[in-house]
Structures are given as structure tokens and as C-alpha cells.
Amino acid sequence: MHAVKERPILFSAPMINAILDGRKTQTRRIVKPTKKHAEGVIILDGGTNRRWPYNMFDGSEADGNGMEFPIGCPYGLVGDRIWVRETWSPISENWREAEDLMYEGNNFWYKATYEKDMIAEGLSKEDAKSIVEHDHIINGWRPSIHMPRIASRINLEVTNLRIEMLNDISEKDAIAEGAQFVDFGKDQYGQQKAGWRCDKTPGNYEESLVSAKYAFFNLWEKLNGIDSVEKNPWVWVIEFTKI
């Protein structure tokens, strides 16, 4: 049994909300080759966490000679923990100095849930929305990449790990990635209106997509660029549970 390690991971605001709502239990991250001129990745033993994926060389490289080189998952092994980085702001500039600020739930603002938190503080929905839109918070929003461990509010445990090609995602796994189904009821002609969205809750039927898989691909292209789905990269499939 290996010693449990902790590593950070970044999530966007919609995915933060999906995790907090219990809708997101998977994330996919591109497998990055560890050597130059890598041709791709092959999977041993079905891609389970007992045998790890390998980087395959074409045999022409002096340092390769057709050998297989292991790729370690940057997010750890099954049983390891991941702490989430998100867009945030300290409530007080003195947060680093106070011993009782080792995260108690009310010492930092988080952009993903800021509007909801402001409403919980007693503001009207309209006032909370106005504050969020103008970023009227004490110290300004800090990028997620700069979030220190002390400010993280979400901790995850890796429960399963594998690699697969991006386009092999199933409808079930796309839902586990946080795709949300919205039922808009029937229109004036009796036609059922419903659809899927991954990056935000659709305000109307026209903003939704026909499947969870398409909703996930839509989000993937927003994060990774046009044609990133068509490139069909190998990805780490990290399954987790919120601690």
C-alpha cells in the first residue's frame, strides 16, 4: 500500500458547482508524452490501474530503440487525494497571519458560488447578481492557479484511474463529467423540449444539446480549442469522490 499523496487540480466555475452538487465524479485530462517524438500511447492490461499506460517509440530514436517508457499520472494513484483550485478571494488581507484561518468555511470568497453565498448573507438576488457582475469584493478575484492549499474548500479522493481516447466517452460517463439535463416541458404544439448542457444551466431549449456526450464535447472545445475533439487525444480518466 503506497503512502497517500496530495496534488492540486484546476476546475472551472461550472464544474465546481457540478462537484458541489454531486453531479461530477469524473474528469478527463490529456495524457502528455514524457519523451519527444512519441507516437502515442498503448494500454496494458485493459488500462487498469494495475498496469500503467506506456509511451511507444517508433524504434528509430537512439534513446528509444523501440522500448516502452512508463507514463505516470500527474494526478496520482487510486487512493491519493486531489485538492481543488478555483477562482477565489480572501475576505481579509490578514488571512495568512491568523491561525484560525486554516479554512473554516467563511474566510474566503469563491467566484463559482459567490452569488449564492451573498444571497445566503441576506442580499436580494438582484443585488447579489449586480455585485458579482462588477466583482465588487474586497480584494479582487485571484486566479485559480494562484490558490494556496489553505484556501481550498474541496478535497477529492481518486477512486479509479484509466486512460482512453477522448471520443470513447460513453453517455453515462459524460453525465459523470457533470453534464446536466434540463426539462423545459412541452411547447405550444405538444413537443417535448429538453436538452443537455455541461458548462452552464441552459436558459432555454435552444442553448441545450441533444446528448450529455455532445454537451461534454462542447465544453471540451471551449477549454481546449477548436478541433480539439476531432484530434481525439488519449486522456486520463480520473474518477473521484468528494471528501
Image: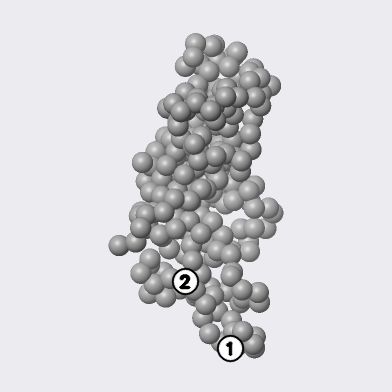
Q: Position of residue 205 (x, y in %)?
A: 56, 34
Q: Is residue 176 above or below residue 104?
A: below
Q: Is residue 243 above or below residue 60?
A: above
When asked about the image quadrant of residue 140, the answer is: top right
Which label sits on residue 150?
none
Q: Position of residue 83 (x, y in %)?
A: 46, 44
Name the residue located 45 percent from the left edge and 32 percent from the top edge: 102
Residue 101 shows up from this direction: yes
Instruction: Residue under label 2, please give it.
Output: 53
Quarter of the image that includes the N terminus: bottom left
- Give the left or right position of residue 191, taking residue 50 as reference: right
Q: Position of residue 216 (x, y in %)?
A: 54, 49
**Between residues 31 and 170, which one lies in front from this camera angle?**
31
Callout 1 amino acid: Asn
Quarter of the image that includes the C terminus: top left
Circles 1 and 2: CB distance less than 8 Å?
no
Comes first in the chain, label 1 or label 2 = 2
SS of the residue under disc 2: loop
Q: Residues within 10 Å of mark 2 (few under 14, many from 20)?
A: many
Instruction: Residue under label 1, please give it.
Output: 65
Callout 2 amino acid: Pro
Name the residue located 41 percent from the left edge and 54 percent from the top edge: 5
Q: Position of residue 79 (x, y in %)?
A: 35, 55
Residue 23 shows up from this direction: no
**Between residues 53 and 141, which one lies in front from this camera angle?**
141
SS of the residue under disc 1: loop
Q: Is residue 202 above or below residue 175?
A: above
What is the image's colouring?
one colour
Q: Is residue 60 above or below residue 13?
A: below
